[in-house]
Image (cartoon, rainbow, N blue to C red):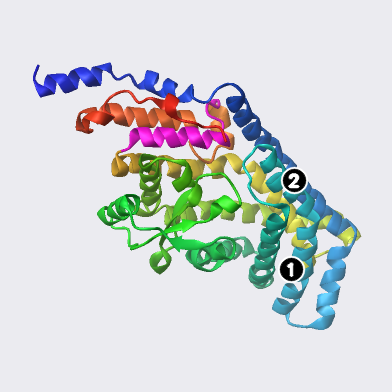
Amino acid sequence: MTLNLLLAATAGAFDVDTATRAYLDTVSGPVRARSDAYFEGGYWMLMWGTLISVLINGLVLHLGWSSRWSRAASRRTKRPWLRTILYALPYILVTGLMVMPWVIYGDYFREHQYGMSTQTLGGFLGDQGKSLLVSLIIGPLVAAAIYGVIRRAPRTWWLWGTGVVVSFMTFGALLAPVFIAPMFNSYTPMAEGPVRQQILAMARANKVPADNVYVVDASRQTNRISANVSGLGPTVRISLNDNLLNRTSPEEVKAVMGHELGHYVLNHVIKMLLAFTVVVLAVFLFLWWATPRLLLRYGGRWGVRDVADPASMPALVLLTALAMLVATPFTNSIIRHNENEADAFGLDAAREPDGFAHVAMRLSEYRKLEPSALEEMIFFDHPSGYNRAHRAMEWKARHLAELPPAKRAMAKPELLTVAN
């Protein structure tokens, strides 16, 4: 038999659906039940989180705290922008403390319940304190800019407000990897070795302007595996967390990094900013329409009669929470589309379909493997494990003849240990 005939016979023996099912079957029994329970519980967490935001902001309005903070700020300064900043400081601090019990339950106790958090309560509260500090610095600036356009353009502030928010989002994408992320984790250069060389070789091959790879000490907080190519222009940084290095094979690391490089090469940061500009615009249009009507009906009892008064901030946040809940299927679909593109790019760049399928199974620790189409459309901001494994096996079937002989055979996913 000639080589071509041999390869054709091998390709014919490879069945995509069988190979995909072999991977999916590695996550079964209690492990699958725990994965499904965790992710499906997230549906309720999303709705309860929105309800809690509405209740907290409604309470701040109902108790008159918002109007009192606004009056106190007015007594201290006649400058509108400074008044907004002085209002925003107690608002962010108080509402941040009010929501903290929910945050502790959802992000600490629930994560420990499902075996995904490694952090002590003290460490968790320390990180939450840092987050609150960042919010107290950035939040008042965002609020001052938004209320500035509300005062100056009462009929078109929905348009200018969108520009303000998107501008801050852009600055965040540019600066967060360098100035904010290191507040929560240590970033150290990856040690020399074959894996680092492979990652940088893929980066050079795809014209990603990075000459180093950083390892994040995420294991002090979580068991989750993760990586990213973050930043814009001069702040571009290739990072992977230590869990990815410690819990996966070199083939899996390479597959993940191929995916992350895809986000950069395909300009997903820019595309996401453009797509979310449309979402932000829709939310601001809703706020522009709904907030005056809400204040007309309840503003008298709240002591808030004008959208331009910083005391209206809880009303804006309350309505935004409701709008973003309704927008969940759209925002998730935007992200999931980009993730699908990065998956396809990563398979071509890394050429590790089995490594990619192995990673998809590991991600099932906190992401349901086989959701319905409706579930995936509404609740998934990444492709499901089934779709990722199936895509990887389709890629393998198409490129079987190009792979090294050792990688042409049906993989043995039963060697994978998914459970913590």
Image point 38% across, 36% down: which residue?
355
Residue 313 higher or lower than 250, as above or below: below
Q: Nearer the viewer, residue 322 or 103?
A: 103
Q: Quadrant of residue 234?
A: bottom left
Amino acid at the residue labelled 2: Tyr
Residue 143 higher or lower than 216, as above or below: below
Residue 76 picture location, percent across and down: 82, 82
Q: Secondary structure at mark 1?
A: loop
- Label 2: few (<14), some (14–19) or many (≥20) C-alpha neighbours in 10 Å: few
- Label 1: few (<14), some (14–19) or many (≥20) C-alpha neighbours in 10 Å: some
Q: Say if the magenta span includes residue 362.
A: yes
Q: Say if the magenta span includes residue 291.
A: no
**Residue at mark 1 to residue at mark 2: CA–CA distance:** 35 Å
Residue 173 visible in the shown view: no
Q: Quadrant of the N terminus?
A: top left
Magenta stretch: dominant SS? helix
Q: Nearer the viewer, mark 1 or mark 2?
A: 2
Q: Nearer the viewer, residue 290 or 41?
A: 41
Q: Which residues are magenta?
A: 352-372
Q: Which residue is mark 1?
A: 308
Residue 365 picture location, percent across and down: 56, 35
Residue 315 higher or lower than 141, as above or below: above
Residue 343 picture location, percent across and down: 39, 40
Amino acid at the residue labelled 1: Ala
Q: Does residue 65 appear left or right of residue 172 in this picture? A: right
Q: Which tag, 1 or 2, sits closer to the chain's start?
A: 2
Q: Which residue is mark 2?
A: 105
